[in-house]
Image (cartoon, coloured by chain):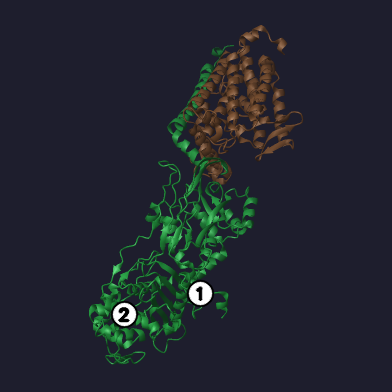
Chain colours: A green, B brown
Amino acid sequence: MKIGDQVQNLGLRVIAIQVIAFILLGLLGARLYYLQIVKGDYYSERAESQRVRFIPIPAPRGAILDRNGKLLVDSRPTYNVVLSNEPLKKINVNDRIEEYSRGLDLDHQFVIERLNLIRQQNEFEALVLKENADMKDIAWVESHSLEFPELRVELQPQRFYPHGTTLAHVLGYVGEISPAQLKDPDYQEKGFRPGDIIGKGGLEQYYDEYLRGRPGYRKVLVDSKGRVQSELEVVRPQSGQDMVTTIDLDIQLRAEKQLAESVTKRGTITAMDPNNGELLAMASAPSFDPNVFVQASSRPEGRKQIAAYWQDEKRPLINRAIQGRYPPGSTWKIPESLAGLQQGAITVERSNLVCGGGIKIGNKFTRCMGSHGSPPLSYAITKSCDGYYYRLALKMGIEGVIKMVEDFGYDKRSGIDVPNEKVPTTPKSMMAYVLKKEGKWSDIRTVYSGIGQDTVDVTPISMLRAVAAVGMRGKMYVPHFLREFKPIAAIGTEGEHDYFPARPSLSFQHPEPKILEATPEQWDVVIKGMWGVVQGGGTAGSIRIPDFDIAGKTGTAQVAELGKDVGDKKDHAWFVSFAPAYKPEIAVVALIENVGFGGSHAAPAVKGVYESYRVARGYVPAPTADDKAE
Amino acid sequence: MVAIIEKRDLRDFDWVLTLLAVAIAAFGVWQIHNAVPTESFWTKQIFGIGIAMIAFIIVAFTDYRRLIDSAPIFYIAGLVLLLLVLTPLGVTVNGQKAWLRLPLVGQFQPSEFAKVPTVLMLAKYFAARKAGNLKLKEMLIGVSIFLGPVSLILLEPDAGQAITYFPILAAMLFLSGLKVRWVVLAAIAAVVFIPAAWYVGVETGKIKRYQQERILAITNPDQVDPRGYGYHTIQSTITVGKGGLAGIQGETETSQSVLKFLPEPQTDFIFAVTAENTGFIGCVSLLLAYALLLSLMIAGARDASDRAGMLVIMGIVCGLAFQIFMNIGMALGILPVIGVPLPLMSAGLSALLSTFVAIGFVVSVKLRRFVN
């Protein structure tokens, strides 16, 4: 039997089957050509991207030291529980929320936030789920490694503030870059990624560029479950630069102690070297513990503590030295005295003005606290005669007061090297508002502006800078914290992709000091008045230190009208000063909120700072335990 | 057995077909090694080829006509094995009871072994019928023979294996004088009814979610459940594409299968492994080898000395061609993921043995192409 013998076109039917088989094989060949030849590179890349992972190696952040090399901020090794992206793509993440928050003691909402955030990133596919994991957390992750392959424990340096609340406002803290910052073009330009740690507030923020290291990474081969098979490449990180600040920790601690011992425990003390603007101390109370922000932001109790900081009516997160604005009260009389002389409203030879126990504007009588006859300038400063300054302000006119505001820089920021400094409120900035509201600038506002009330609200740092400039006889420096950034060597091979260039040492770039023009006699008369405040029977005679002449000025800033100034509405106490009076080495400002008279509250606090300064400089021996016992 | 091999047998023996089949199987061993170099699947496969060769030689040198005469015995034996699968002797893997574990013999897949008996049974029946157009009664009897094993396989349930039986029946009917108009009608009906059945099935929930996803994964693998069947299709497509022109040639350190991105690399997705390792050149060579294999078999069908021999070969050809197309089409992401092994390539004793026995029949038919 041969196939051709058959009926029903058997031969043709067999050929048909063969043809169909060949067509199907041809179809497969065409598809192969498309996948392998046309799209080969595309699939190669896809295969590579799913088997190659970049595991970041965090770079240690630079330490922060005081001027004597004492440690202020450091990083210490901690364990973090890290969430990787790849295994998460293959599971329903909603099942995990409950498990994570229970197993790791995390806030429910926080876990949801983290899972949402990690889905938005692509390249570095890991995010910290829990910082500062303890042994219990680590054990939980290890024992659930089969169930939750997306979790792993990583060793990571964590920012540590050994002194807790001390200097917190100046140092700031670090935290994960916020979603808003990630969208900011300025940050995007620098290549930030979700989960990056950056400085928030204070020096940590201002000098973030220098403190922050450049992270490296491990390029690894992973299998489909995200398990590392082998290491392909390591790019070493470059650590951040260590920062030496101008702070003297001993003086800082003393300043904070003074605030802690004050009646309301609210206020600020700042000390500066008037010869160059180096800040020796900046205390603001109440304070906060930056470690809470760094360590506990993922825990329920930590988030509660942070929320409490934000809601606290005493506003512990505010740096009162640069963000608090207070009426300067009588401390305002120092710049005003010099301005009066400069502008010719008074002269060195004829500086007397009538006190009169006060002044009558229209039919309203505004009192002076005493009756000083017709005092000369030095005496008016020493005794803080309000009547004198009512009349001086009227003689200068509001234009003169505004000129003074501009000369002493009250209309600008001081230029201090921490962020979020506030600009004082002055007659200059209030003028437009007052004119719009009242149609004219009345004399009574000029009178009040003469004693630092009403339209005047200044930051303690602006007050310190102005008074220090008086001590320096006209040289006004920019207050700052930076002494030096230590250099860091280059990492990797030049020209290669793993190269991080060396980072040179950096010191504060001093701008030329601003010069206030006045004659030596004019300076003498103002400084003599300030000397008298402490040494000449003035308003702060109680803080006198033998062989260390302090030139100062008290201030008692009214918060509420007379009669209502009790309790929380009590006056703010001010003291501005420098010492030694005729060759200043240190200038100190103190502001204590709602305690009353400056001479009784602020001045003694400043005295403590001077004492610690004298010990720090070796002028006097440190007090022994016996001394303290007395 | 060797004693009865005559000189003439050795002369007429189809050495080319045999060597081609062995060459493809050997190529398969290399790919199984590439798929999982750390496991011993490839050595087991060599052992399997050895056993399969013995079975092959026995079948090839036995007169197929005698075997066809005994077809009902083989057929019933096949049905018994398939029934045993459904008893507690059956082994459940991935929710399917497709394996049988017998003492001494070990574990095997009866749905593979029932294939050749079904071909023989159908060939015996259709060869005996009178010439002329296929009658309805004849067709129904053919369908009944076919439904025996297929319905048992569907009870396992192993839809993938069941599907591979369809081309065997189709070949028998087509080559037994089924009117062309019926063929055309069936084609039209398929075009109309398959989408309609799909729609009704989905709407009524008769087609389960996971079954739908297997299908939907082809049209849009990234959207449909990238963790489930979509994931298989995506990974297989990536693996094939990654091979490029010449492949990674055994440098498997970063291969898709070693890193476990590709599922079932030594069995269902052995073609993807081949594509990754040997590239377009290797794959096209393999396709040409299959084309040659099928052509040699079809040539044997043309020269067959009787109708039964022709039907046996063509049944086997259609079964193999369909499996090749289903398996590779699945690896290339154009057909749904169903567990059909690639003939001669996939690791697995049952399929290897069944395929070599089938080819043994083809060689046997060719050996006796000259009418005595």
Give the percent coordinates (x, y) of residue A280: 43, 68
Density class for disc 2 (Cα within 10 Å; few <14, some 14-19, many ≥20) is many
Tell me the subunit letter for badge 2: A
Residue A515 visible in the displayed image: yes
Give the percent coordinates (x, y) of residue B240: 51, 33
| Quarter of the C terminus of chain A within the rendering | bottom right
| Quarter of the N terminus of chain A within the rendering | top right
Residue A454 visible in the displayed image: no
Q: Under tag 2, what secondary structure?
A: helix
Q: Is residue A201 shown left or right of residue B26?
A: left
Q: Is residue A355 above or below residue A192?
A: below
- Amino acid bearing label 1: Lys
Give the percent coordinates (x, y) of residue A292: 53, 64
Give the percent coordinates (x, y) of residue A297: 53, 62
Residue at label 1? A257
Tell me the subunit letter for badge 1: A
Residue at label 2? A526
Name the one closer to the observer, A526 or A167.
A526
